[in-house]
Image (cartoon, rainbow, N blue to C red):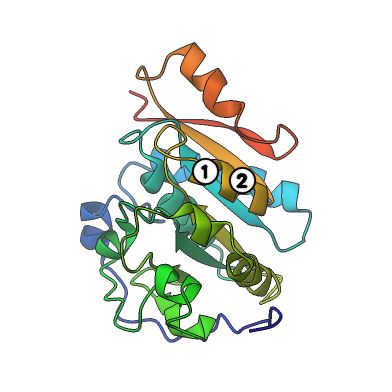
Amino acid sequence: MSESQPLSTELVAPIQFSGRQLAERRIVSHDMADSRPADAFRDLRTQLLARQEGRPAVSLVSAVQRHSGGSFVALNLAAAIAFDESRRAVLVDCNLRAPVLHERLAVKAERGGLVDYLEGQVERLEDILYPTGVARLMLIPAGQRREASGELLDSDRMRMLLDSLRGSDGRCSVVLDGPAVSSSPDARILSQLADFSVLVAGYGRETTAALKEAAAVFDPRRLCGVVFNRVP
């Protein structure tokens, strides 16, 4: 691939998850008995979309440290974007050392994932774009685990992938689920490729010093703020 090419994000979805299945997977939905989680992610979605000003954009979600809920926030932000029937969301699992989104969304990455594409084992971006049980939400799974992930993420092929997703459709938002800031330099690399970044902190878990240190990794002009996960 010598240059990025726009692609279609119109994919035929499998059977959609039931309300019970969504709850089991901790994915927000329109008809939750307790609407507060869905409302919180709607608010985050609205803030990000306002910053985009109608332009296609890529948003990175990364936690201060592992187990603070970065993947949970990334998945539910994408799901909240997909609430709107006029929009679509593409969720990209960039946590190449410990991917979880394919399991949470019950996606069998039979054609490969992000790693396979970045290593050139899969040529077409469309082949690693999978529909999910959440309407209008598509997933690019991580694929094969890789400890040495920095070179793959900081590559021309990764840049072309994001440019293709940006150019696919003005109604399509891209959310990157990045690794924790404390676990590798990958979050910093991804923040330089994304248009916006969101930092996730475990409520009552991170110190003020740890938050400041993690936030310093990101360009302050692109950092949208901090989301506190597991707030009582």
Q: Pointer 2: residues within 10 angstroms few (<14), some, or many (20+)? A: many
Query: Which residue shows up at 51% across the image and 57% down it?
Result: 151
Amino acid type indicated by mark 2: Ser
Query: Which residue shows up at 47% across the image and 62% down it?
Result: 92
Reply above or below: 51 against 155.
above
Amino acid type indicated by mark 1: Ala
Disc 2, SS: helix
Residue 170: give x, y in percent of width and height. Answer: 71, 70
Whether residue 194 is visible, yes or no, is: no
Q: Which residue is mark 1?
A: 187
Judge from the rendering whether residue 50 lies leftward or rightward of residue 158; answer left or right. right
Alpha carbon of mark 1 to alpha carbon of mark 2: how far?
A: 6 Å
Residue 146: give x, y in percent of width and height. Answer: 34, 59
- Residue farthest top in this picture: 208
Callout 1 touching callout 2 (CB < 8 Å) = yes
Judge from the rendering whether residue 130 lies leftward or rightward of residue 199; answer left or right. left
Reply above or below: 163 against 19.
below
Q: Quadrant of residue 220?
A: top right
Residue 74: give x, y in percent of width and height. Answer: 45, 49
Query: Which residue shows up at 50% across the image and 13% down it?
Result: 209
> Which quadrant of the figure contains the N terminus?
bottom right
Reply above or below: 114 against 30.
below
Q: 172 or 189: nearer the eye?
A: 189
Reply above or below: 154 against 232.
below
Disc 1, SS: helix
Q: Which residue is mark 2?
A: 191
